[in-house]
Amino acid sequence: MKHFKFYSKEDILSLTKVRRFETKLGERIRHLEPGGEWPEVLQQSPAKYVLVGIPEDIGVKANLGMGGADTSWLPFLNAFLNTQSNDYLLGDEILLLGHFDFGDIKYLIENNAYKKDELIDAYRHAVNIIDEEVENIIKAIAAAKKIPIVIGGGHNNSYPVIKAVAKGLFKAQVIPLAQVNCINLDAQADFRPLEGRHSGNAFSYAEEDGYLGKYAVIGLHENYLAQNVLMEFRDNPFIWYTTYEDIFIHEKMNFTQAVAHAGGFTEDTFTGIDLDLDAIEHVLSSATTPSGISVLQARQFIHFTATDSKVAYLHIVEGACQLSDGRRDDSTGKLISYLVSDFVKAGISGRNM
């Protein structure tokens, strides 16, 4: 656990603005109690959800992308922990485990590799290290029959998350085969060739290794869909997709129908929910788009999939509060807080007001 920081109650309260006559999520959210091996302690927790941060942009840079995906975790926490605890969401359904810090690896690469090819090779090698460490933590969460909520970070982390959840649920005898499905709301397919690990090929690696069963992608942008990936998607019976243009330009189906179709396609087993924030119009991300879905539609996507699927995990990726080119938007953290709240509320919707 070299790169993982477990949070204490003091860590959580240091980010929580306590106010008289009010209760914030930070005062109710659970933490890992001291004593014993942490997976066994986690298993005893009554929390249904386990929140983990992976604030890194190494995978994005390994994909020749814009850095900054490592900047949204703390702004998210500041927003989420200061959300009101009330009958809609109490907070004790969630355990805040902690976050990864791969800053030492990034520093080592960027101070020793100078040529472009050297940098790319080093970043891609580092993603393998990230994969292994992320898998170890997430697998323990899934094996404890908890639902991981993972805040990135690059979309490269979908590979170790899918692999870990599949292995963990199999170990817990929840599924007969170490394989899960995924619904991904994304402007890009992230199904690039197996050319070394990066944020653009998490799902192709997960499929190649047998951990990804069915893959449904909503909202792909035709302008950024490579022909070889398009041919693979058309020929693969375990992949269903619809483009942004099919929904909003050609109006072959509406957004709700697209989400419902993805849910039906993946309903045979546990399904991970991925949301790449570059799908949302004008949200600061590694690939910010001027043409995308609305925040309202993103929230509806989270609600509908979390309500109708056998949920394996939630993974929100690529959001940034500051990009490496200087662009800044502190509201990204608050947006992620809304999305996580919507997800948990959908999972506990049986609670009456």
Image: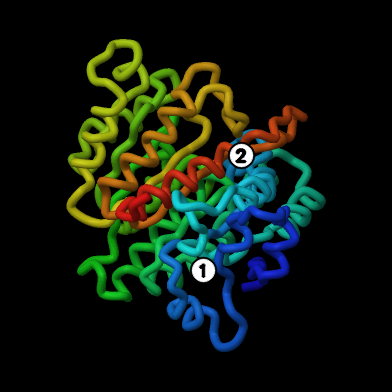
Q: In which image quadrant can residue 331 be found?
A: top right
Q: How far apart, in angstroms, are the residues tagged by discs 1 and 2? A: 25 Å
Name which residue type carries label 1.
Ile
Q: Nearer the viewer, residue 115 or 282?
A: 282
Q: Farthest residue in the right direction?
A: 111
Side of 81 where 327 appears, left or right: right
- Image coordinates for residue 118, horizontal then vertical, percent: 69, 46
Q: How is this picture coloured?
A: rainbow
Tell me if I can see residue 349 in this picture: yes
Q: Secondary structure at mark 2?
A: helix
Q: Which of the marked residues, 1 or 2, is nearer the chain's N terminus? A: 1
Residue at horizontal 51%, vertical 52%?
86
Q: Nearer the viewer, residue 278 or 300?
A: 300
Label drawn at residue 137: 1
Q: Farthest residue in the bottom direction?
A: 36
| Residue at numbered disc 2 | 334
Residue at horizontal 38%, vertical 27%?
220
Residue at horizontal 43%, vertical 38%?
190
From what the image shows, is residue 53 above or below residue 35? above
Side of 209 where 156 appears, left or right: right
- Image coordinates for residue 257, horizontal then vertical, percent: 24, 28
Label drawn at residue 95: none
Q: Nearer the viewer, mark 1 or mark 2?
A: 2
- Image coordinates for residue 225, horizontal then vertical, percent: 40, 25
Tell me if I can see residue 57 in this picture: no
Side of 38 where 325 appears, left or right: right
From what the image shows, is residue 135 above or below residue 110? below
- Image coordinates for residue 279, horizontal then vertical, percent: 47, 29
Name which residue type carries label 2.
Lys
Q: Secondary structure at mark 1?
A: helix
Residue at horizontal 45%, vertical 52%?
87
Crowd around label 1: few <14 · some 14–19 · many ≥20 (10 Å): many
